Amino acid sequence: MENPLAQQSCVPAPERWQNAVSADEFYFVDENVSDALTDLPSLRRRILELSYIEDLTAQEIADLLGRSLKFVYNQKHIALKKLRDTLLRGGESE
């Protein structure tokens, strides 16, 4: 019997992501993403930039910002939750 996960891994990542949810559920306009990021407090936005754009590890971010590793993880989690919530509402902040 063939492992179904082995078959799935052959599908390119963007296609797997696109097929994971309906288009109606995740329709993000660039403006909405930009606005949602702008609404974040600057430190949370900076943590996301360092993590996803500059590709730093959480430990590297903590060292750079002079914060604890736990602080970086917590702030990143809060920022991602806020972004998700804002984007699922169509980009409207609370």
Image (tube, rainbow, N blue to C red):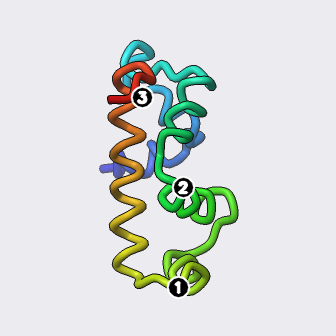
Q: Left of 81 or right of it: where is 19?
A: right
Provide residue 28's location: percent of width, then percent of height.
Answer: 52, 23
- Identify the residue at image location x=33%, y=67%: 74
Mark 1 vs mark 3, foreground winner is: 1
Q: Give, as a three-letter code, the residue at label 1.
A: Gly
User: In the image, 1: left or right of 23?
Assistant: left
10 Å crowding of disc 1: few (<14), some (14-19), many (20+): few
In the picture shown, does residue 8 fall above or below 62? above
User: At 36% across and 43% down in the image, what residue appears?
Assistant: 82
**Gap in angstroms between the C-alphas marked 1 and 3:** 30 Å
Q: Are marks 2 and 3 in contact (CB under 8 Å)?
A: no
Secondary structure state at the residue bearing disc 2: helix
Amino acid marked by disc 3: Leu
Q: Position of residue 91 (x, y in %)?
A: 45, 24
Q: Amino acid at mark 2?
A: Ser
- Which numbered disc flags the more N-terminal residue, 2 or 1? 2
Helix, strand or loop at mark 3: helix
Residue at 42%, 61% in the rendered image: 76
Q: Which label is found at residue 66?
A: 1
Circle 3 crowding by C-alpha within 10 Å: few under 14, some 14–19, many from 20: many
> Is residue 32 visible in this depiction of the protein?
yes
- Residue ID for mark 2: 42
Vertical comparison of 57 with 26: above or below: below
Q: Secondary structure at mark 1?
A: loop
Look at mark 3 in the image and give the residue it sits on: 87
- Of mark 1 and mark 3, the one earlier in the sequence is 1
Which residue is depicted at the point 38% across and 70% down?
73
